[in-house]
Image: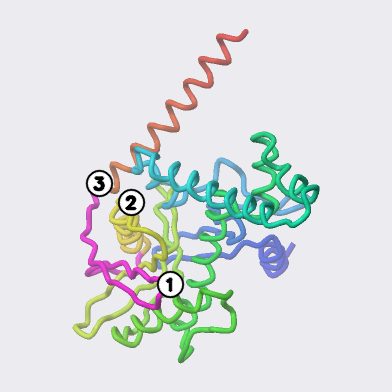
């Protein structure tokens, strides 16, 4: 099989090849945000063997959250709002039998969950939609401007998302960045971790800046996340990052730029925390399996 045929099969499977200046190469698939050092090309379809897979930076830093109470409360609030919306619709029925039918979803927890899912009003659905909104903002605003478009692709946004696009455009006009890399994949093969950040650019003082666009609430994971990106940028051979920042876009069209200091020691500690968590999880599975024999 020729190299060209390999390339066609790899592309058809959704993978893109990323060759780094240091000579290393990895593969990335956008559909599931997965990274791998090598692909199995001999089977009936292209696969990424488990032993070659790389962990995403975003997965590693999630272990810094610790207390998940805030996320649980957010999900609960989304569910409450969804139940209230469905109940209000049912209570608005003029006919008693129609009202009973509309409110029948309240009979038990399973039917409430099913109704929320069908109406896309639950916490899981709200989380997924927030993710899709962030992805569309990255692709149709940030990435579009970095590729040379004079304005974001406003027609690609869903209703209510244009504020995020305006925020991105406002930052771009105020900052006037000189893009170096957009949506760049970086990795540390030895650590078996990879990630993709939004933009590196040269500022008016000639400094190389790593910037990541955020459309959600501030998170303590951001410094570790950007520090890993900056470390990998250097190790891949792209150069050195002089400073880092987060652009926080809001739906009202405003933005904030947060300077982020490098915290390499904490970022590497997050990696070890993630590895320890995986090792302990594997150990306990083995213990429980042995205990049930």
Number of numbered markers: 3
Tell me, yes or no, whether the two marked residues, 2 and 3, touch with CB atoms within 8 Å. no
- Dot 2: what SS? loop
- Dot 1: what SS? loop
Give above or below for 88 relative to 278. below
* Residue for badge 3: 266
Q: Nearer the viewer, residue 249 or 188?
A: 249
Residue 203 in the image, given as x and y percentages of width and height: 25, 81
- Dot 3: what SS? helix
Q: Is residue 196 magenta?
A: no
Residue 151 in the image, given as x and y percentages of width and height: 47, 89
The residue at the point 23 percent across, 68 percent down is: 243
Residue 252 in the image, given as x and y percentages of width and height: 40, 75
Tell me, yes or no, whether the two marked residues, 3 and 1, touch with CB atoms within 8 Å. no
Badge nearest the viewer, 3 or 1: 1
The residue at the point 58 percent across, 41 percent down is: 50
* Residue for badge 2: 221
C-alpha gap between disc 2 and disc 3:
10 Å
Color scheme of the displayed model:
rainbow
Instruction: Identify the image quadrant of residue 30.
Output: bottom right
Give above or below for 33 relative to 256. above
Q: Which residues are magenta?
A: 237-264
Instruction: Identify the image quadrant of residue 16.
Output: bottom right
* Residue for badge 1: 251
């Amino acid at each position: 099989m020729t190299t060209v045929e390999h390339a066609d099969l790899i592309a058809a499977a959704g993978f893109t090849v990323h060759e780094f200046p240091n000579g290393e190469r990895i593969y990335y698939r956008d559909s599931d945000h997965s990274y791998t050092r090598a692909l199995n090309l001999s089977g009936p379809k292209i696969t990424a063997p488990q032993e070659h897979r790389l962990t995403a930076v975003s997965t590693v830093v999630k272990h810094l959250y610790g207390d998940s109470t805030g996320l649980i409360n957010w999900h609960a609030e989304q569910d409450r709002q969804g139940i209230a919306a469905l109940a209000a619709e049912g209570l608005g029925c003029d006919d008693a039998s129609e009202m009973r039918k509309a409110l029948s979803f309240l009979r038990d927890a399973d039917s409430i969950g099913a109704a929320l899912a069908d109406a896309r009003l639950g916490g899981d659905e709200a989380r997924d939609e927030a993710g899709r909104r962030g992805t569309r903002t990255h692709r149709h605003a940030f990435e579009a401007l970095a590729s040379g478009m004079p304005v974001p692709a406003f027609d690609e946004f869903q209703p209510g998302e244009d504020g995020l696009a305006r925020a991105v455009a406002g930052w771009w006009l105020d900052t006037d960045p000189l893009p170096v890399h957009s949506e760049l994949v970086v990795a540390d093969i030895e650590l078996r971790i990879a990630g993709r950040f939004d933009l590196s650019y040269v500022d008016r003082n000639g400094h190389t800046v790593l910037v990541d666009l955020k459309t959600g609430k501030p998170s303590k994971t951001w410094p570790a996340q950007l520090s890993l990106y900056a470390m990998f940028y250097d190790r891949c051979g792209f150069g050195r990052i002089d400073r880092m920042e987060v652009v926080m876009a809001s739906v009202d069209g405003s933005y904030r730029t947060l300077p982020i200091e490098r915290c390499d020691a904490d970022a590497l500690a997050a990696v070890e925390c993630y590895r320890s968590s995986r090792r302990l999880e594997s150990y306990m599975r083995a213990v429980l399996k042995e205990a049930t024999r």
